[in-house]
Each structure stands twice: as structure tokens, then as C-alpha cells.
Image: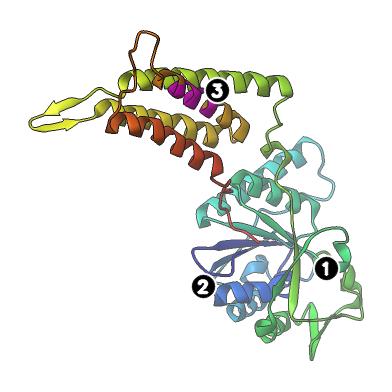
Amino acid sequence: MVMSGSGESVVFVHDRPGDEALLTGGTIARLRADGADVVVLFGVRAAGDTGEDPAASADVRAAMAGLGVSDWRMLAAPTPAGNTGEAAADDLRALTAHLADVLDEVGATALVLGADDVRLRAAATEAAHTAGIPIFRSMRVSGAIGQRVIAIDMSDHVDVKLRAVSAYPGRWRVTDHTVCPTVPSAATLTGTGGMTAAGTVIGGTETYVRLPPHPAAAEPAPGPGARALAGLLAFVVGVVFGVLGTIAHQATIAIGPVVIPIGLVLSLAGVTALLAGLRLVVGDRLIVLLAAIGLLGTIFLLSLRSAGGSVLVPEGLPGTLWTIGPTLVATVVLAWPRIPARHGSA
């Protein structure tokens, strides 16, 4: 969740209206104040919701207006309590597809999960993994023991959050900075974040835990045999490029009075494509290093004067560039830091 507002689009998923205000209202208000787009999704119709469509109730409209949110939606109707087996699996797939469509539609850069409903959490997590965006789960510090907690400072938006919570008089009662469930037994409902009947005090932070990437997204590390084979192949390819480039780098083409060192240009372009491509695709510096050793070692050997006195890399500007250029390219490619894909960050 980037607080810069620079093109961010954050989707919040909650069980039912009212949870978004209590659990993530401060974060939503801060994101909106920073210019980020926010979409709130509700997934469970529970007893006490107003009207056929809870998202159309006056409570929700008042809370969303206070938080500055103009886009909120109800997801697919929940699976009946006794529905199991293939019907439940079909329902879960449909819900996941619905969530995925919304994430794609709004160009989501992060998903915030405030739901306790197992089905909704599973669908939202799968949809976010498919979209390749980070997932942040709303969680109290006491419930995140052993995990790295991300605290969002919402001290400037506490009053906004309290007003949004107050918009749900059927669920919450606000006294100063303390929020209590209107019906004491409602403290056990989903989405209350462990609230007791005595209520909870609204402070200046909201806490989250970033969920790990989908296990399937992490490619298994190659075994030592596969890595050794890849390294050998990279070395051989480096040797081949070194031979071809050394032979071709002196070639020129004349266009009128202009002489273009076409051989040198193509040789340097090929070397750059080889090393940079290996670094981007394989991502293993050792593999790139072995390719560079094969390349640079071949260039060095072929630049030496043979027993018969001939040279393949004569003195002059093309020869100098051919001996220096690949070395510079290899140095830059090997030293370049790994840059993670950007999908939003904590």
C-alpha cells in the first residue's frame, strides 16, 4: 500500500458493511487523502443488514461518503450453509473469478483483506495471486505474534474513521474514541477483529501483515546438476560469441563517404544481448559469469599474435573497442542489482 497516490488502486475486501470502517477506515481515509483510488468489496450478507442489497443502504452510503470512497460493491451471494462438495467448489470458483474481474477492471495494485469468512478469504487470496499484486491482511498486533507487522499511521484521520463507524448505529456505538458493539453478542460476529463486548479504543494506527507470495509462484531452485549443465552451456555459448565477434568485428560497410563499422556494432550488440538476456531470464550471476569468462577469455586468446605472426584483433579503434567493450558490458550486467517487479509495496 503505497501512500503516494501515484497511480495506486487499492481494493479492500470485507465480510459485511461496517467492517471496513472499524478495521481499515483510517487507512482508507489516508489513501484517499493521498489521491489513491480505493474500491471496497463486501462478501457476506448477515443478519442485521439493511435492505435486499446491503451495499445500497443509507448506512453504507454515509460511511463511504465520509471516507471519500465512491466505488463499493457486493460480491456474489454466499453459499448456503449446508452446501458442500462440487456445488461449494463451483461457488468458490465463481467468487474467485468475480474478484479477479474486479481487480483487473480497476487496475488494482494491492489488496487489503479484512474478512474472516474462510470462503471469501480463499477467493480473494487466489484472485490477488493470479493478478500478481501484494496482499495485506488487517490484523491486531496481538494476533500477529511472530510475524512482521506493518503499522499505518492514520492519526490525522481518526475523526474520519470514528464518523464512518458511527454511520452504522445498528452495529457500533461510539463514545469518545471507544467503539462498542450495539448488541453485546455481536462482538463475536465476523470482521470485528476480536472485539469484546467492552469495545475497543481507536488509536492512531492500523496494523497489517503482508501475506507471502503464492507457493506456486516461486520456481523451485535448480539442482546442482542442472546448474552445472547450465553453467557449461553458458560458457560454450560465450566462447562461440567470442569467436564470431572477433572474426566479424573488423567488417565495415561504406555508404557514400561514410564507413560504418557494422561488424563491431553487431558484435557488441550480440554480446550485450547474450549477457543481459541471461541475467534477465536465468537471474543467476554465476551462469552469467561463466558466459562472460568464456567470451572474454576467447577474445583475449584470439587477440594474441599467432606463431605465424598473424593477428585477428589488429591495433586500431575497432580492435580497442572490441577488447574493452565486452568487458564493460559484462561488468555492468554482473553488478546490476536485482529489481523486483512493482505491484505496490508496503
The residues bearing labels 3 and 1 have C-alpha atoms spaced at a distance of 50 Å
Give the residue drawn at x 65%, y 84%: 156
- Tag 1 secondary structure: loop
Colour setup of the view: rainbow
**Can residue 284 be seen at all in this image of the molecule?**
no
6 displayed left or right of 81: left
Residue linked to disc 3: 234
Q: State whether residue 344 is above or below residue 34.
A: above
Lower sequence index among marks 3 and 2? 2
Q: State whether residue 255 is above or below residue 32.
A: above
Asked if labels 1 and 3 touch by Cβ distance under 8 angstroms, the answer is no
**Which mark identifies residue 35?**
2
Query: What amino acid is labelled 1 in the image?
Result: Arg
Question: Residue 317's x, y, as percent?
Answer: 28, 33
Lower sequence index among marks 3 and 1? 1
Residue at the bottom extreme, as displayed:
176
Q: On the image, which quarter does residue 161 sit in?
A: bottom right
148 displayed left or right of 129: right
Mark 3, mark 2: which one is toward the viewer? Answer: 3
- Tag 3 secondary structure: helix
Secondary structure mostly seen in magenta is: helix
Q: Which residues are magenta?
A: 292-300
The residues bearing labels 1 and 2 have C-alpha atoms spaced at a distance of 26 Å
Residue toward you, 310 or 19:
310
Question: Residue 302's x, y, as percent?
Answer: 41, 18
Residue linked to disc 1: 140
- Tag 2 secondary structure: loop
Q: Quadrant of the N terminus?
A: bottom right
**Which mark identifies residue 318?**
none
